[in-house]
Amino acid sequence: MTLAFLNLSWPVFANGLEFGGIYALMAVGIGLVFGVLRLVNFAYGQLIMAGGFALAYGSQWNFPNWASILFCFGVVLGLSLVMDRLVFRPLRTHSPAVMLVATFAVAFVLQNIAQLSFGTFGKSAGALAFLNSPWDLGGVEVKKIAVIAVVTAAVCLVALQLLLTRTSLGLHMRAASMDFRTAQLLGVRANRVIAGAVIISAVFAAIAAVMLSVEQLQVTSTFGLSDTIFVLAGVVLGGLNRPIPATLGGFSIGFATGILGGALPSSQSQYLPSILFAAVIVVLLVRPNGLFTRGGGAVQRV
Amino acid sequence: MSAAPPALVLEELSVRYGAVDAVRGLSLEVDRGEIVGLIGPNGAGKSSTLHAIMGAAPVVGGDVRQDGRSLVGVRSEQVARNGIALVPEGRRIFGELTVEENLRLGLAARRTRVSGVAFDHAYELFPILHEFRRRQAGALSGGQQQQLAIARALAAEPDVLLLDEPSLGLAPKIVDVVFEALGRIRESGLAVLLVEQRAQRTVAFADRSYVLANGELRLTLAPQDAGDTDRLVAAYLS
Amino acid sequence: MSALRRAPELLVPALLVLGTALFALQVSSYLQAYFLDTLVKVAIVVALYVFIGNSGVLSFGHVSFVALGAWTAGVLTVPADQKSAIMPGLAHFLLHTNVGNLASLALAAAVGAVAAFVVGLPLMRLSGLAAGIATFAVLEITNNVLTYDQSIGPGENAFSSVPQTTGIWQAAVGALICIAVAFLYRTSRYGRMLRATREDPAAAAAVGISIYRQRLLAFAISGGLAGLAGGIYVHLLPLTAAGLHLDLTFITLAMLVVGGSGSLLGAVVGALALNGLYSFFSAATNGVDLLGWNLTVPQGTAELVLGTLMALVLIARPGGLSGGRELSLPRRRVRLEA
């Protein structure tokens, strides 16, 4: 059975959904932190890499899978908080361009620490490889990880949406990403809002690490790097400071990557990054806030 | 035992941005249940004074005290949580949030845990907000947004209310609504510091008004001085 | 008078480069390779400085122009009889066009300048974060195209068989040309106008300076210098597209940030000092003799040291990226002449 109109087979379509889901989570993780800090975190990929290495160690030490995953969450969360405390907080009041360069530096430091510690070939994280085997869904065979990725992403994004709209922390985070100064004047606590964004962003990075490690069993110092660069492009395309557009941007990129990676010969998909980044430039020139964003309300962010 | 200190006291307050002196040696008091006006020409230092109270402008000298405790060096968010609410210039409502969400933001500074959120008081003061509570705040008119900004500040149940030019850009009828609401706020026992451009109306309305020019206090006026245009003009131009 | 007073701005960096070159002549050929590499880095960092230092706008894209310069000089100088073997997909006219060393360098600079101008036409309207991301996108596009398009170069493979004409003097002269151009631009009225837009965009616009045009000019000049540096680089060692991507971008930005992006001297000192450090730790992966004590470090140490330094400098002196003082003799404080 095929999706004839798209000229796609089910496995390819599922692959698109899988990467769409993973990239959507990463996009939201990057977008949330950008919202409150105006910080584009180049080092997000290295958080995912750290999670990957945590999983690899979990495998090596024969942890049960739940413990490996928990360990991965702990490592990513801890590293995120350290990064926020040591780098982002001192630079919080500086221009987004300075912070961008700083995260660029942090990314390199972390990547080279990994290179130093684990060598060029990295470590193997094979514990979750069994998720590559298919499930039979009504006559269609779909990789387990594809189903898990889509479901997990959907659950996480719905939970995030509820948090943002139904809780006071969520309301404060939304307000802070629109107008941080006014939010503070109203008594919104800056550190709490930023910690909220950093923690959620880290949780999504950890989830992405777990799911990416299923596809990419060998964890090296560049684990998650190219994914993050693609997602960064997707987030800019979607709109940096709004969760839903960022999700759409991330999902689209992931879906396109997943489909093109499987459906077309490589001679046709090799220029995908060029097309993607050309689109990024066009979007930046035409609509600095991103493609999927509605027009601003009566009160503009300053 | 002496009486409790006034709700808000500025003592020889000086504010400086870089090389620019915005406020020089300003002293004033606001007590519970009174409205104090702060008027003066553009650039006189009125907004800087409010920002200094909120911990959002660099204080280089003097003191700001709430109930006798100094606020100098306290962060904005903590000043707000101490019970001082600002209605900022230009209203600064969150246009993409609903009216009710804007009011919920006002709760951020409440000191007591809020159970079963109710904005009855705000809705009673400004019925239009109740009608539009599910709308995006950006879709409201300027006057409605101003009412929302005041209601949002009151949602924090503050002891001191600071208003930065609440009548700016509003139609006369709406200005009446705003001033009428301020009168009722005074009756509820809040200390109100009102920065305004509408000098005569403010002097007539407030319990006491200070005229600020070039960052310095020039004149203190009582309501009965409202008709005395000459003194006002002299103070503005001095 | 003014030129005399400003002479140290030019002379000190130039003497540093000359000193490095002269010193390099005294050492073994093994060590000389590191000095050559350092001189090329000086050229690249000075090119970066011309744009970032004067405009205060971030660019992650300059290594694109280095790469284009390298591709230009490389493809035009690989001996004709080896071209089809090394670059089987090469376009017909490139297969049959060959030029000498100097012409290839001049063309590399020209291609860099033209590419930067064309890219700058739309991009120079952006600043701040948007400029950072857009120039990063340029880097990604250039790298992607150079990696896969075999009609213009070796694709993923190394640029081998390019005549290795870059010795100490070619590298030093290249760096000196970059320094001289940077100095002339900085002291020209265009350079002053661009710096005025950095200090106070509103005031600069109010006196009639077109921020867009001044940025575009600086971008094209720095693109030309980057192209020249790329040409010199490809004549030094067989480059790959992968080697002209994120790592080089990061390393050169780190040198500029640590040295202080606001001054030519800072850019040169940053490049010399950090590349010295970088070379040392790179060499130490194979073991170096340090005062009789053998030091061996794992691969990645050099990048780690640079990254940490850069992060520390950014945290301690965040203004270093956009502000800076030029070295000059004491003088009265003068108004911006713009």
Image: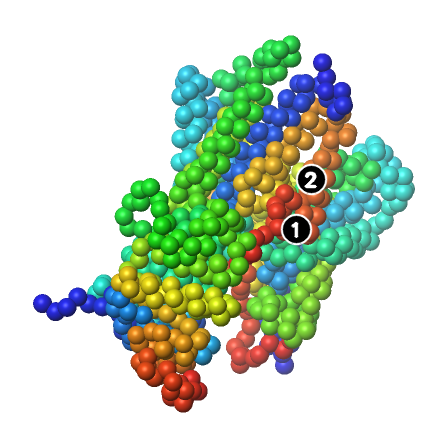
Both marks 1 and 2 on one chain: yes
- Cα–Cα span, label 1 and label 2: 16 Å
Q: Is residue A19 above or below residue B132?
A: above
Query: Taking the image as drawn, is residue A114 in sight?
Result: no
Q: Nearer the viewer, mark 1 or mark 2?
A: 1
Q: Which residue type does callout 1 highlight?
A: Arg
Query: Taking the image as drawn, is residue C120 in sight?
Result: yes
Quickly name the residue at label 1.
Answer: A287
* Mark 1 crowd level (few <14, some 14–19, many ≥20, 10 Å Cα): some
Q: Nearer the viewer, residue B117 or C158?
A: B117
Q: Is residue A32 left or right of residue C82?
A: left
What's the residue at 46%, 24% (across, down)? A55
Q: Is residue A77 above or below residue B173?
A: above
Identify the secondary structure beneath mark 2.
helix
What's the residue at 64%, 34% (across, down)? A252
Label number found at residue A276: 2
Label number found at residue C32: none
Location of residue C97 in the rendering, given as x and y in whole percent from the top left corner: 88, 45
What's the residue at 71%, 44% (across, down)? A278
Q: Is residue C212 left or right of residue B75?
A: right
Location of residue A190 in the rendering, given as x and y in whole percent from the top left corner: 39, 50
Choose the circle earlier in sequence order: 1 or 2: 2
Q: Which residue type does callout 2 highlight?
A: Leu
Residue that extends furthest to the left in the rendered view of this protein: B1
- Marked residue chain, label 2: A
Q: Is residue C179 above or below residue A202?
A: below
Which quarter of the figure is the N terminus of chain A placed in? Answer: top right
Location of residue A30 in the rendering, given as x and y in whole percent from the top left corner: 53, 41
